Amino acid sequence: MTPDSHTTDRRDFFRIADRIGLEYYPLPVGGPANSDPFSEDHLDGLRSELKRMDQDFRNQLPVLAERDRLAAGLLKSLNGKVDTLARIMALEQNPLQPQQWRDVTLSEGGVSFLVPRGEFSAGDALALRLTLPPELYRPRARAEVVEVCPAAKNGELEEIHTTFRDISEADRQQIAKHVMRWQIRQRQGGHTSQ
């Protein structure tokens, strides 16, 4: 079987129906590719530093575990405690308004959600920022609307299906982990994340 040019880069993704924070902005056709409607310059440096420190911690933990399992377990527990505290603080600051929490269908490849009728058409470009509970990861992507369908229950809404066109590998991995954790919770009889 020889792969053709249309299927060589195509991947099938697991999809979940979830409630997440979703912010989106239409991007102008032919507009600057480097503009970021979600730019938070004053926090971006701190977030980058925190990610670097977290990665260093995760890299060093297995080395410590080989020498002292008790200390490694204690540090892992402490790290979980700090993560939980950070999520509580983030939720108390109310990062999103209630209308920005939406029911979506999410995968590593894109997201589908409801919008007012006529707001978008196939081929439109969007800037997206997702907030994935309970960890509150905030992946960003540029997406393209690939399909617009009438909403089943409301004639004033349409469901748009998007595919990610520009997303960092780290953000794609955050979405993949969120989808996997959601599936595990469902198998264990848990509830959806929001």
Image (cartoon, rainbow, N blue to C red):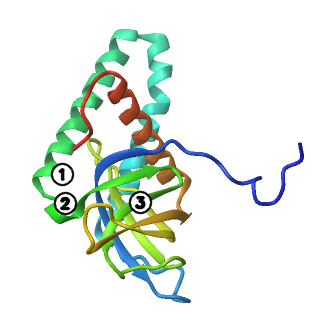
Residue 77 location, x and y as percent?
27, 23
Question: Furthest residue to the left?
Answer: 92
> Would you place residue 135 above or below residue 190 in this image?
below
Q: Residue at x 42, y 51 (%)?
A: 106
> Would you place residue 130 above or below residue 146 in this image?
above
Label 2, on which residue? 95
Counting residues from the N terminus, which is met first, the one under dot 1 or under dot 2? 1
Q: Give the Cα distance between marks 1 and 2.
A: 7 Å
> Would you place residue 173 above or below residue 124 in this image?
above
Label 3, on which residue? 112
Q: Amino acid at mark 1?
A: Ala
Foreground residue among 60 and 5: 5
Closer to us: mark 3 or mark 2? 3
Label 1, on which residue? 90
Counting residues from the N terminus, which is met first, the one under dot 3 or under dot 1? 1
For the N terminus, which image quadrant?
Answer: top right
Secondary structure, mark 2, is loop
